[in-house]
Amino acid sequence: MTTIHKKREERLRVLTQTHDGFLWAQGIRFAGMDEAGRGPLAGNVVAACVIMPPEPLIPWVDDSKKLSAVRREQVFNEIMKTALFVGVGQAGPEEIDEINILEATKNAMRRAAAGAKADIYLIDALQGLGLSGEERGIIHGDALSYSIAAASIIAKVTRDRQMEALDREYPGYGFAGHKGYGTARHIEALRALGPCPAHRRSFIGHFV
């Protein structure tokens, strides 16, 4: 067995032996939830809700931030083929500006969970969504739960694709590269071009 395979097996043990493994063993229907895009200056905040079966396990499921863009796309496709349920919800810049990013993120998560019909929701860091089942907020959940990690990949890839589309719609800002985050290049373009409809006005006030 190669070193890479050993590391992936160890990561799967970490991700499945506690939260997910305990619930699978009890036959409880549960979902993992995570979001992408709370911090950027532009674009939607995107949430995902997934229900994963105990078999087959997808070896490369992990916190989306730990995977390359190419690997995330590959694992995204595997999750979409394997998952029992995948829901995606989002909130756009106008909603974020109107009610703040935390509340907009909660709305995106509620939309993602619609139709999941889970008894328990494992959620990365958040609670208080008012979902139909028990909510368990897990700090750093995308590094501790297989299902939350799968949700993090769905949310991240979905949002990255949106930002690549925005790059074509609003060229000059570099959305495809920085994905809306406040990089030096993005701020420079924002000051030179002014904001576009994809920007969150409540986030960019001191840059323009």
Image (cartoon, rainbow, N blue to C red):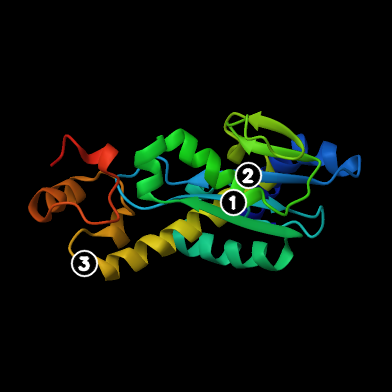
- From what the image shows, is residue 202 above or below residue 162? above
Q: Earlier in the sequence, mark 1 or mark 2?
A: 2
| Residue occupying image coordinates x 64% and y 56% | 87
The part of the image, by quadrant, that contains residue 143 is: top right
Query: Given contact means CB atoms under 8 Å apart, are the residues at marks 3 and 1 in contact?
Result: no
| Three-letter code for the amino acid on which mark 2 is drawn | Met
Residue 144 appearing in the image: no
Q: Residue furthest front?
A: 98
Q: How many marks?
A: 3
Q: Quadrant of the N terminus?
A: bottom right
Percent of width and height locating residue 27: 91, 44
Percent of width and height locating residue 10: 69, 43
Q: Residues within 10 Å of mark 1 (few under 14, many from 20)?
A: many
Q: Secondary structure at mark 1?
A: strand
Q: Is residue 61 left or right of residue 104?
A: right
Q: Earlier in the sequence, mark 3 or mark 2?
A: 2
| Residue occupying image coordinates x 64% and y 30% | 138
Q: Earlier in the sequence, mark 3 or mark 1?
A: 1
Q: Residue furthest right?
A: 26
**Which residue was labeled with disc 2?**
33
3D distance between C-alphas at marks 1 and 2:
6 Å
| Residue occupying image coordinates x 34% and y 44% | 40
Percent of width and height locating residue 103: 48, 35
**Which residue was labeled with disc 3?**
171
The part of the image, by quadrant, that contains residue 204 is: top left
| Three-letter code for the amino acid on which mark 3 is drawn | Pro
Q: Residue furthest left?
A: 192
**Which residue was labeled with disc 1?**
48
Query: Given contact means CB atoms under 8 Å apart, are the residues at marks 1 and 2 in contact?
Result: yes
3D distance between C-alphas at marks 3 and 2:
32 Å
Nearer to the camera, 171 or 117: 117
